[in-house]
Image: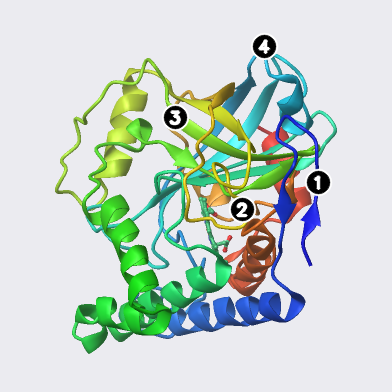
Amino acid sequence: MGFTHSGSDGTGWTDSPDDEATLAQLVAAIGAQQARLANSSHTGLNGQVDRAQHQKQVLGAFATLRIANEIPESARLGPFARSNASYRVSCRISNGQPCPQADTASDVRGIAIKFFTDQDVETDLLMTNEGGRSHARNAVQFMAVADIIVASLAEGPKSGLTTGLRELITEKLGLIEGLRVLKILLEETKLHYVDSVTTEHYWGSVVQLGQAAIKYSLHPHETTEPGTDADRHADDYLRADLLNRLKDGPVKWRLGVQLFVDENSTPINDASIEWKADVVTVGELEIASAPSGEDEARINQLAFNPANGFSPLGITHARKDVYAASAANRKDRGVLTSEEARALLKSR
Ligand code: HEM
């Protein structure tokens, strides 16, 4: 059943979360995908379960999140409550696929940030560069597409699946929905060439902040140089680009927030539609220097969850349960608890 919240400034939304049975199916599906990937000889995971998405860490670094000094009242809450606050954060930059692949392969790119607020609330921001929307309308559709991609990766390059992705997706979702999903994936991965993760825009999915429904996002900082000095044909060129930039100085992004307007321009329950609303600047993210190998290894063991620090809305309800399951399933590789993550951040 939907829940309506009325008012202004980001309120007035109606949330229709998935039911318990659907959530349980999604949790089971992510476990099956992780096991299938781990047990395949084509995925490079050596039999051990890893993240069900975003397996390859491009860079893991400690960073600083500075909250802006003027924030609109409706967003001046939770992590954005204190003007000019400065938080130590951990930042994991990743490729979207569930097993290691060259940076030159078509993919989405993600940034996950974890920090603890003044009130000691564990807060995670997770964003991808899919143009402010997902290829999937909802979590069931997301998982159906992931099932097909996972099968193709697990079967390996010679499987009939690799050439038949289009057919399998349209068969599973129907012709119109299947083609819509494929068009977004094509536009945001294969046709969207990424010079550098610092020149990309990233968005999260919808969450609740106070009474408002919001989407947060990261945008290139005004000081960011376009292009790249890295060798674009190298397997790890995105990492090389970041390390080259960090030799010259800090890399930065602008953190923004959009507030819900109405179901047409800023839908809560359809994640495939880009929000048409102003992006208000709420902060700045800065990685000051290249991380040590040890820091990167610890950051790779963090478990991020888009429901940490916010109440989930729309597709984020399912993400809350599925990320927790994915992290629990990969515990044999070492996953830091919230207490360990807090201690790690305090030490940096
Ligand atoms: C719609 C917008 C979405 C965004 C912006 C997003 C973003 C991200 C990012 C940035 C990560 C990497 C986290 C890390 O570095 O550890 C990630 C991981 C992951 N995502 Fe998503 N994602 C989205 C949708 C979904 C959906 C709908 C599902 C499934 C229901 C999903 C399942 C996962 C899983 C299982 C992981 C790995 C979690 C772990 O093992 O720690 N994502 N996502």
Residue 5: image tag: 1
Instruction: In the rendered view, tell whether residue 181 sits above or below residue 303.
Output: below
Instruction: In the rendered view, tell whether residue 1 sits above or below residue 205.
Output: below
Considering only order in the chain, which callout, 3 or 1, is on the residue closer to the N terminus? 1
Considering only order in the chain, which callout, 2 or 3, is on the residue closer to the N terminus? 3
Label 4 vs label 3: CA separation? 18 Å
* Side of 149 relative to 212 (left or right): left
Which amino acid type corresponds to the residue marked 4 in the rendered image? Asn
Which amino acid type corresponds to the residue marked 2 in the rendered image? Leu
In the picture of the structure, the residue carrying the numbered disc 2 is 302
Which picture quadrant has residue 295? Answer: top right
**Element under label 1?**
loop
In the picture of the structure, the residue carrying the numbered disc 3 is 219
Which amino acid type corresponds to the residue marked 1 in the rendered image? His
Considering only order in the chain, which callout, 1 or 2, is on the residue closer to the N terminus? 1
| Circles 3 and 2 in contact, beta carbons < 8 Å | no
In the picture of the structure, the residue carrying the numbered disc 4 is 69
Label 4 vs label 2: CA separation? 30 Å
